[in-house]
Amino acid sequence: MGRADAQPPPVAASDADTVAYFDAYVPEYDPGRLELAADYIRRHASADSELIDLGCGVGNTLAFLAEQTPITRFAALDVSQNCLDKTRELVECETVLGSAVDASVAARLAGRFDFAILSAVLHHLVGRTRAESRRNAVDAVRNALTMLTDEGSLVIHEPVFEQKLAMDAVFWAKRGLSRVSGNRRVPVLGYWGNLGAPVVSYYSDAGLARIIAEGGGRIVEQHSEPEKLPGLMDRLLDRASTTVAVVAA
C-alpha cells in the first residue's frame, strides 16, 4: 500500500501548547485498553476493510489493531509530524498531517473508511474554555463520521469521570499551571497524575453520549469498565474506561 503525506492545513480549533507537548514527549500508551475496540472490529471487518486512526500518536493503536484484527489497510492522522514518522516505523500506512477537528481534512477523506478510531483523543481537543473544548469534541465526532462509508463504524475509547464540577476544576487548574510550568508536566500521585501539561477536558459517560449525538452519531455498542484512582482521589471521583461503537444517525 502506498504512503501519502498530505500537505498540512492550518491546525484549526486545537491547542498549540497541547500539540507542542505531544510533539516533544510522544507518550506511548498501553494498547491493551483497546481490546474491546479490537473485538468489535474483528466481528465486523473483512480483509479489504480500511481503517483510519485519528490522533494516532506514535502508532501503538494501529500496531495493536494490525495484530488483533483482519484489517491490513490503514491510515493515520495526527497534528504532529514527529508522531506520524514514528507511526510509519511500526505500521505500513498512509499518513495525513492535520487535525481531527478540521472539516477540510474530513472533506478530503469523505466516505472512504470502513472504520475510524478516536482512542483517548477527545479529552485532548482543548479550547480556551470547557465549552469550546466540548465543541471541538463534537466536531471531531462529526468529521470522523464524514470519513466513513455508509456502513462504516466509528470506535471511540475515552477515560470518563463523574462529578463535572471537579473536571471543570481540573481543566482550569491545568490550563493555568501549564502556563506557569512552561508547558512541562508536573507529576502528582505518580507520573500519570499531574497538574501541568497537557491540558485536558474530561467528560462523563452521559456527556460523551451527548457529544456523539450532537456530532450526528448513534451508539450501537457501549462498554464501560470502572477503574480505581490512587489514594483519596478514588473517594472523590468515579473513573471508567469507556469504549463505544458509533454509526451515523
Image (spheres, rainbow, N blue to C red):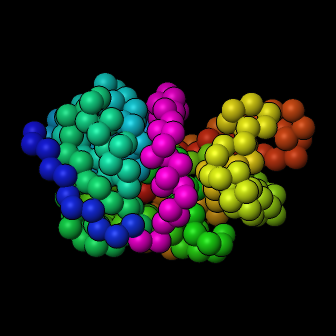
Image-based side of 91 in relation to 231, left or right: left
Residue 178 in which image quadrant: bottom right
* x, y percent for residue 70: 24, 31
Left or right, 11 with respect to 66, comes to right
Seen at 33% across and 35% down, the residue is 86
Residue 42 position in % (x across, y down): 32, 34
Task: Give the percent coordinates (x, y) of residue 134.
Answer: 58, 69
Q: Can residue 46 be seen at all in this image of the molecule?
A: no
Magenta span: predominant SS is helix
13 in magenta: yes
Q: Locate residue 20 relative to residue 11 in the image: left or right.
A: right
**In this view, which residue lies farthest toward the left?**
2
Report the span colored magenta: 12-36
Residue at the spot x=29%, y=47% of the render? Answer: 76
| Residue 182 seen in this snapshot | yes
Quarter-of-image position of residue 128: bottom right
x 27%, y 30%: residue:
89
Total labels: the figure holds 0
Question: Which image quadrant: the C terminus?
Answer: bottom left
Residue drawn at 39 percent across, 61 percent down: 100
Viewer-nearest residue: 242 or 164: 164
Q: Position of residue 164 (x, y in %)?
A: 77, 62
In the image shown, does 81 or 133 lie closer to the viewer? Answer: 81
Looking at the image, is 34 positioned above or below residue 107? above
Q: Quadrant of the N terminus?
A: top left
